[in-house]
Image (cartoon, grey):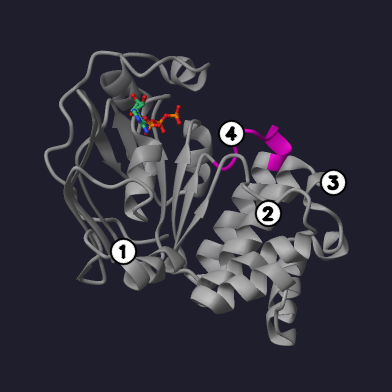
């Protein structure tokens, strides 16, 4: 269980995330929606402490991870792998090595440096990486440079790399924002597969309500840093969207409108978490 308690992040006078409380049971797939600037990235980045919270706590299975330092913080980051919009692969390295890089989180200090410098990975690690690639239909591309792959393929390599960390949670920050609809679907299918087959909790930031509805057990809607809705997709009706964002569902789906519509009252507290479908 991942618990966020009053999580807040301020940048100067701007409150990017404002008192978000959320309990996510293990194995749930949660879509975080909101317009540009709503605080989605900041929320996800606080969970693995890439961005430090200004206030509030993050607990995982009862352990407070908010103040972890050094090796304990690195261990936490291994447990919650991050997927980025721009894939963050080393473009000039081959696909297999990019996936093996996910294994470095399991080594520390000198061993990690030596492994990365000399690409020294065990036969078992290579087999694990190849299996992760095969799972996403990318075994034929294993020895190609990452920059020869399409965006959708690169994002699946990033998911394979994340799996090498053997994470409990995957934090996917707009993983399909740079992809065409077909590739977006393939990448969302891959995320759903690791959620369902491996029981990995997935938190995924999305711009599109339809995608969140199709893939997620639960949707969290953010506006101006606040959590305005938390519940199953069926409850996030067009009327509720209008109430929160002041626009129709079609208008919400359109374009990058800055997050500034008049706000309805945020949800008072995290509702009882729905169980995974
Ligand atoms: N490092 C930073 N320094 C200053 N302000 C920041 C920083 N990161 C985010 N912000 C601000 O915090 C607010 C929330 O940004 P955030 O990127 O979390 O939103 P988002 O919903 O993920 O938007 P997008 O969909 O465009 O990525 C914005 O006003 C943004 O300008």
Picture quadrant of ligand 1: top left
**What residue is shown with label 4?**
177
Q: Is residue 246 above or below residue 276?
A: above
- Residue at (77% x, 56% y) in the render: 93
In the rendered image, is residue 178 in sight? Answer: yes
Q: Earlier in the sequence, mark 2 or mark 3?
A: 3
**What element does badge 4 sit on?**
loop
Q: Is mark 1 within 8 Å of ligand 1?
A: no
**Nearest to viewer (mark 4 / mark 3):** 3
CA–CA distance in space, label 2 to label 3: 14 Å
Q: Is residue 101 above or below residue 239?
A: below
**What element does badge 1 sit on?**
loop
**What residue is shown with label 3?**
148
Magenta-colored stretch includes residue 159? no
Q: Is mark 4 within 8 Å of ligand 1?
A: yes
Q: Is residue 217 left or right of residue 138?
A: left
**Nearest to viewer (mark 2 / mark 1):** 2
- Disc ID at residue 156: 2
Q: Where the N terminus falls, by quadrant? A: bottom left
**Nearest to viewer (mark 1 / mark 4):** 4
Q: What residue span does the magenta drawing correspond to?
A: 175-183
């Amino acid at each position: 269980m991942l618990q966020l308690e009053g999580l807040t992040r301020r940048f100067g006078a701007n409150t990017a995330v404002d008192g978000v409380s959320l309990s996510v049971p293990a194995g749930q797939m949660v879509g975080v929606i909101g317009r540009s600037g709503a605080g989605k990235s900041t929320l996800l980045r606080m969970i693995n402490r890439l961005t430090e919270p200004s206030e509030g706590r993050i607990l995982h299975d009862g352990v407070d991870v908010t103040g972890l330092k050094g090796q304990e913080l690195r261990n936490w980051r291994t447990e919650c792998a991050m997927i980025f919009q721009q894939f963050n692969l080393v473009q000039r390295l081959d696909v297999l090595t990019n996936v093996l890089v996910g294994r470095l989180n399991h080594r520390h200090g000198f061993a990690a440096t030596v492994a990365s410098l000399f690409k020294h990975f065990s036969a078992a690690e290579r087999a694990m990486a190849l299996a992760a690639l095969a799972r996403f239909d990318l075994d034929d591309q294993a020895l190609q440079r990452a920059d020869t792959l399409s965006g959708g393929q690169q994002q699946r390599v990033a998911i394979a790399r994340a799996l090498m960390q053997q994470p409990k949670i995957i934090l996917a920050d707009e993983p399909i924002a740079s992809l065409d609809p077909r590739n977006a679907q393939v990448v969302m299918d891959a995320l759903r597969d690791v959620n369902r087959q491996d029981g990995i909790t997935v938190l995924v930031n999305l711009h599109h309500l339809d995608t969140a509805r199709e893939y997620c057990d639960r949707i969290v809607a953010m506006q101006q840093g606040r959590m305005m809705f938390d519940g199953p997709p069926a409850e996030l009706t067009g009327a509720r969207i209008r109430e929160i964002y002041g626009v129709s569902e079609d208008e919400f789906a359109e374009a990058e409108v800055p997050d500034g519509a008049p706000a309805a009252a945020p949800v008072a507290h995290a509702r009882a978490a729905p169980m995974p479908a």
